[in-house]
Image (cartoon, grey):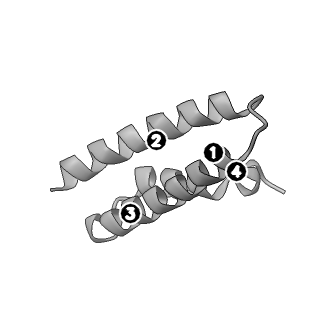
Amino acid sequence: MTQEENLPEWKKLYRAALLETDANRLMDLILTAEREIYSRLRELSQNQDSSSKTSELQEIDDALRNLRVLMSNKT
């Protein structure tokens, strides 16, 4: 199994959006990544184990910020 396969789905989609060069596909990838990120945030909010949550929440915050920059550069 590759490292990419071990990544959470939101992170795979986020990376795909960052690497997308086709402007027509970019917006769809951004929106799909955002949906998956918000789904993951809901999961994390229901999970009481906070040991690994903090670093993932920071990664999610960074990802959302970067996706917004990508979106603003697209429009």
Residue 63 appears at what percent x and percent y? 46, 41
Tell me the number on the disc at residue 31. Answer: 3
Give the Cα distance between marks 4 and 3: 19 Å
Give the Cα distance between marks 2 and 1: 18 Å
Q: Name the residue tied to disc 2.
A: 63
Front residue of this view, candidates 45 and 13: 45
Could you tell me which residue is drawn at 47 percent across and 62 percent down?
35
Q: Is residue 6 above or below residue 22?
A: above
Circle 2 packing at 10 Å, graded few (<14), some (14-19), many (20+), is many
Q: Name the residue tied to disc 1.
A: 45
Quarter of the picture containing the C terminus is: bottom left
For label 1, the SS is helix
The type of residue carrying mark 4 is Leu
Mark earlier in primary sequence (2, 1): 1
Could you tell me which residue is drawn at 77 percent across and 28 percent down?
51
Give the Cα distance between marks 3 and 2: 12 Å
Q: Are marks 4 and 3 in contact (CB under 8 Å)?
A: no
Mark earlier in primary sequence (4, 3): 4
The type of residue carrying mark 2 is Ala
Circle 1 packing at 10 Å, graded few (<14), some (14-19), many (20+), is few
Residue 72 appears at what percent x and percent y? 20, 48
Tell me the number on the disc at residue 7. Answer: 4
Front residue of this view, candidates 41 and 62: 41
For label 3, the SS is helix
The type of residue carrying mark 3 is Leu
For label 2, the SS is helix
Could you tell me which residue is drawn at 44 percent across and 56 percent down?
34
For label 4, the SS is loop
Residue 31 appears at what percent x and percent y? 38, 63
The type of residue carrying mark 1 is Ser
